[in-house]
Image (spheres, helix red, strand yellow):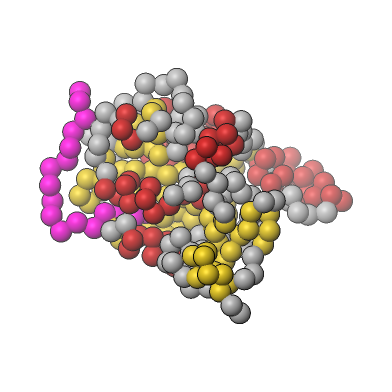
Amino acid sequence: MKNSPHILCPICQYKAGNYSINVSTYSIYKCANCGLEYTDPLPTNHELFSFYSNYSDVRANKEIVKLNASKNLQLLEKFGLNTKSRILDFGCGTGGFIEVAGENCFAIDLIKKNHPQIFQSIEELPCKKFDFITLWGVLEHLNEINSTMSLLSSMLNDNGYLIITTVNAEGIIPYYHKPPEHLTYWTKNSLKILAKNIHCKIEEISDYFMFQRNDIYFNRLLSRTPKKYSNKIMLSISTLPEVVKVPTNELLVVLKKSSPHKNKSTKCPS
């Protein structure tokens, strides 16, 4: 198969083949080297801003977001989170995570929010260095992966952590190709290359579990199942708790900044 001469995998720079999946005005390629599935052409920042200005997600119920935020903070404690740790939540959405994380957490989101700890750009942040930078379901939305992730890596204190959840292209739970919302779909190999590119090492890659309302979870899970079967299954879940901990089609990735020198943390203003 001949390669497409002008289309390269954004992670390993391998040339794309001619085959792609067409979704609306976009094409989805799968890298033959690292396995990453990626979108071409990438939407511009203006197009993304327009898309997310009217964006909503039925799965992102406020109480569910906070419940998962508490669970995710417990994960950070495993890697040394304490009351003095500084956190940046990149792509915070409605801000549920920072509400749970507290005053030492700041956030960035594309859409302006009326919250004193949420900013639209890195330049506006009162802190420039962090112990933890989190991207909860954000990596697959980025149209400038390498520059964004390199910048975030540079904002970590020595031995700081990037915590990522993102679409698993190798998992058993199905997912949709849905640009311009999701632009990349990840494999463990592509994540390892990303880590190397941004001078981090992988501490953990594992399946990601989250809390969700059972009706929303099973509606999504059965979205490709014929109605006569899915309706019967939905009737049978009435005995389950309203909120359940479920597997997802995402990976949890913990990256640690590789640094030979240990410098003092840069503190935020009090």
Q: Residue at x 56, y 70 (%)?
A: 4
Task: Say left or right for 53 vs 104.
Answer: right
Q: Position of residue 89 (x, y in %)?
A: 39, 37
Above-or-below relation of 45 to 207: above
What residue appears at the point 40 percent right and 39 percent down from the top-left corner? 90
Frontmost residue, 65 versus 67: 65
Vertically, is 157 above or below 99? below
Coordinates of residue 123 in the picture (x, y in percent): 31, 33
Quadrant of the frame with the N terminus:
bottom right
Q: Is residue 203 visible?
A: no
- Please tell me which residue is depicted at 21% across the width and 30% down the height of the picture: 268
Residue at point 33%, 51% (across, down) = 150
Give left or right: position of 127 versus 14: left
Q: Nearer the viewer, residue 221 or 5?
A: 5
- In this view, which residue lies farthest toward the right? 228
The residue most toward the front is 5
Residue 8 position in % (x across, y down): 49, 65
How far from the left and from the top, in percent, is residue 61? 58, 32
| Secondary structure that dominates the magenta span | loop
134 up-or-down from 187: above or below: above
Q: Which residues are magenta?
A: 254-270
Question: Which of 120 and 269 lies nearest the eye of the viewer?
Answer: 120
Residue 201 as seen in the image, left or right of residue 60: left
How many discs appear? 0
Please tell me whether residue 255 belongs to the stretch shown in magenta: yes
Image quarter hosting the C terminus: top left
Q: Is residue 213 visible?
A: yes
Residue 215 in which image quadrant: top right
